[in-house]
């Protein structure tokens, strides 16, 4: 039987930790006793924040080194960063395709790679690929492909990380009201139905960490 995860004084790193879902994840983890630091390209005044562009492998390595220098270890890493674009593929620019994969796929891989190299047995890696990774949609084909690639990576990473005693969770929540669609890097978002509350999604992901889960399909987020 899996032992419950002990959050007390564990160090958690959240990439995209200043966003809608990232902020909710931070609150949930802090409520359970974690020390939490966020990583993003922005420069907030929070002294625990690490400014890094994770689209670069060198930046990912440096961000993890900075976190360890500040806190002594890294026990939980959650990737909540991402960008989205809308529109048919025949009008999608090469720059948009590259940015989607650099952020959603390459950045994710670089972060997980750097994290796994610095994590002890019992640590947890969380990738949020999202419901789009289960079924891609017209008008979101490249975004969906970048997330499906991250999901595929997470599946193999989970098997590799087990050798080091590190657990990997792939989370695929349905549409969530994070405001990401309103910040699309290209195109106009369709009219989505009201999404999930980020607090609800964050609570479910943190509960999965607590309970020893490794896969969170969209159906796992049902109210």
Image (spheres, rainbow, N blue to C red):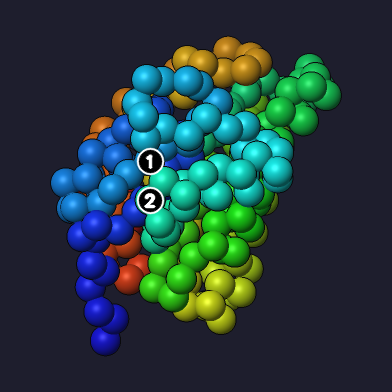
Q: Position of residue 169 (x, y in %)?
A: 45, 61
Identify the residue shown where x is 49% and y is 65%: 119
Residue extending farthest to the front is 69
Q: Position of residue 9 (x, y in %)?
A: 24, 57
Tag 1 secondary structure: strand
Q: Tell me the quarter of the image containing the N terminus.
A: bottom left
Q: Which residue is mark 1?
A: 37
Image-based side of 24 in relation to 81, left or right: left
Q: Position of residue 148 (x, y in %)?
A: 62, 49
Instruction: Indicate the quadrant where residue 7 lies.
Output: bottom left
Identify the residue shown where x is 47% and y is 78%: 165
Q: Which residue is mark 2?
A: 71
Identify the residue shown where x is 54% and y is 62%: 118
Q: Nearer the viewer, residue 183 or 42?
A: 42
Image-based side of 6 in relation to 216, left or right: left
* Of the two numbered discs 1 and 2 in the rendering, the one whose residue sits closer to the viewer: 2
Q: Residues within 10 Å of mark 2 (few under 14, many from 20)?
A: some
Image-based side of 73 in relation to 62, left or right: left
Marked residue nearer the N-terminal end (1 or 2): 1
Q: Nearer the viewer, residue 189 or 71?
A: 71
Q: Residues within 10 Å of mark 1 (few under 14, many from 20)?
A: many
Instruction: Indicate the quadrant where residue 28 lies.
Output: top left
Mark identifier at residue 171 = none
Tag 2 secondary structure: helix
Confirm whether residue 102 shows in the render.
yes
Q: Position of residue 209 (x, y in %)?
A: 32, 62
Confirm whether residue 128 shows in the render.
no
Do the numbered discs 1 and 2 sit on residues whose CB atoms are within 8 Å?
A: yes
| Marks 1/2: CA–CA distance | 9 Å
Instruction: Indicate the quadrant where residue 94 lies.
Output: top right
Identify the residue shown where x is 37% and y is 35%: 48
Q: Is residue 22 above or below residue 68?
A: above
């Amino acid at each position: 039987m899996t032992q419950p995860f002990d959050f007390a004084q564990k160090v958690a790193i959240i990439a995209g930790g200043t966003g809608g879902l990232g902020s909710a994840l931070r609150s949930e983890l802090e409520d359970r006793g974690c020390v939490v630091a966020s990583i993003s390209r922005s420069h907030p005044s929070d002294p625990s924040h690490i400014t890094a562009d994770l689209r670069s492998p060198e930046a990912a390595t440096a961000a993890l080194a900075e976190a360890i220098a500040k806190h002594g270890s890294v026990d939980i890493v959650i990737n909540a960063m991402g960008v989205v674009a809308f529109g048919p593929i025949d009008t999608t620019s090469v720059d948009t395709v590259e940015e989607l994969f650099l952020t959603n796929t390459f950045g994710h891989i670089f972060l997980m790679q750097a994290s796994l190299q610095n994590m002890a047995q019992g640590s947890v890696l969380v990738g949020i690929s999202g419901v789009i990774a289960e079924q891609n949609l017209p008008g979101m084909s490249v975004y969906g492909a970048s997330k499906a690639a991250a999901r595929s990576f997470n599946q193999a990473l989970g098997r590799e990380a087990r050798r080091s005693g590190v657990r990997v969770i792939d989370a695929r929540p349905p549409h969530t009201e994070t405001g990401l669609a309103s910040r699309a890097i290209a195109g106009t978002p369709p009219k989505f139905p009201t999404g999930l509350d980020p607090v609800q999604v964050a609570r479910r992901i943190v509960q999965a960490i607590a309970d020893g889960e490794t896969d969170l399909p969209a159906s796992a987020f049902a109210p």
